[in-house]
Image: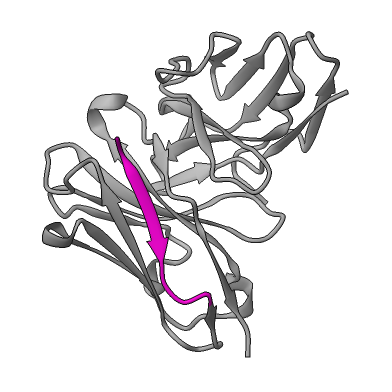
Amino acid sequence: QSVLTQPPSVSAAPGQKVTISCSGSTSNIGNNYVSWYRQLPGTAPQLLIYDDNKRPSGIPDRFSGSKSGTSATLGITGLQTGDEAEYYCGTWDTSLRALLFGGGTELTVL
Amino acid sequence: QITLKESGPTLVKPTQTLTLTCTFSGFSISATGVAVGWNRQPPGRALEWLALIYWDDDKHYSPSLKSRLTITKDTSKNQVVLTMTNMDPVDTATYYCAHRHTSLGRGVMFDRWGQGILVTASS
């Protein structure tokens, strides 16, 4: 069981908005920056968001990140069928001295 | 353009040592701020971080696997090598290497990933 908690699955219709949560503690999310990754089936993870809310070049502004206290959220607007993937949050844990990933959330675009 | 590729055995026997090599291009592991990490993903399960090595040879390991892991770098060959001792069937996973640069953000994250290599531990 992951230290970072994500919902196992979320779903929404094309064109709609969805949010994915990532819950942790003061030793990880509460005091370190959060990143988000998308993993399409059969492929390697891709960085979507870093430093809580920054997008790497090439990532559309449909993707956004936010953080409050010990929880972080990934938002995706204008959902497309191509967004169906597994999404992971990640952050450093100061107490464990380890990089943590959440358990992953499967996004279904109905 | 940064690229990374993992190589090594795809099948190992229990108790054997796994040696994986990450060969990269588009950056130098000796450049200030650069780091390469290893992660793995058992079939159908979540990502798990394993180890990280920085340009200055600073190394970090997953606490739960630290006794079994060794990460090293070969600057001249543009490679980072991960060894994992005493392999077990539960170590069956796709292993990924990935790039980090401290100038790209203040948090610890990977902006480029290799394609991964599936390693099966079985007799």
Write the residue at 63% across / 84% down: B122
Residue A105: % across, % down: 71, 35
Image check: B104 left or right of B13? left
Write the residue at 77% across / 23% down: A81
Q: Can residue B110 be seen in this view?
A: no
Image check: A83 left or right of B1? right
Compared with residue A104, is residue B21 higher up or lower down, i.e. above or below?
below
Check the picture and name the quadrant holding the C terminus of chain A: top right
Compared with residue B20, is residue B54 higher up or lower down, i.e. above or below?
above
Quadrant of residue A37 within the rendered picture: top right
Is B2 one of the magenta-colored residues?
A: yes
Write the residue at 54% across / 45% down: A44
Compared with residue B87, is residue B75 higher up or lower down, i.e. above or below?
above
Image check: A106 left or right of B113? right
Q: Work out whether residue A10 or residue B31 is closer to the camera in this orientation and state it.
A: B31
Residue B4: % across, % down: 36, 50
Q: Work out whether residue B62 or residue A83 is closer to the camera in this orientation and state it.
A: A83
Residue range highlighted in magenta: B1-10
Residue B56: % across, % down: 12, 49
Residue B36: % across, % down: 30, 49
Q: Work out whether residue B111 or residue B91 is closer to the camera in this orientation and state it.
A: B111
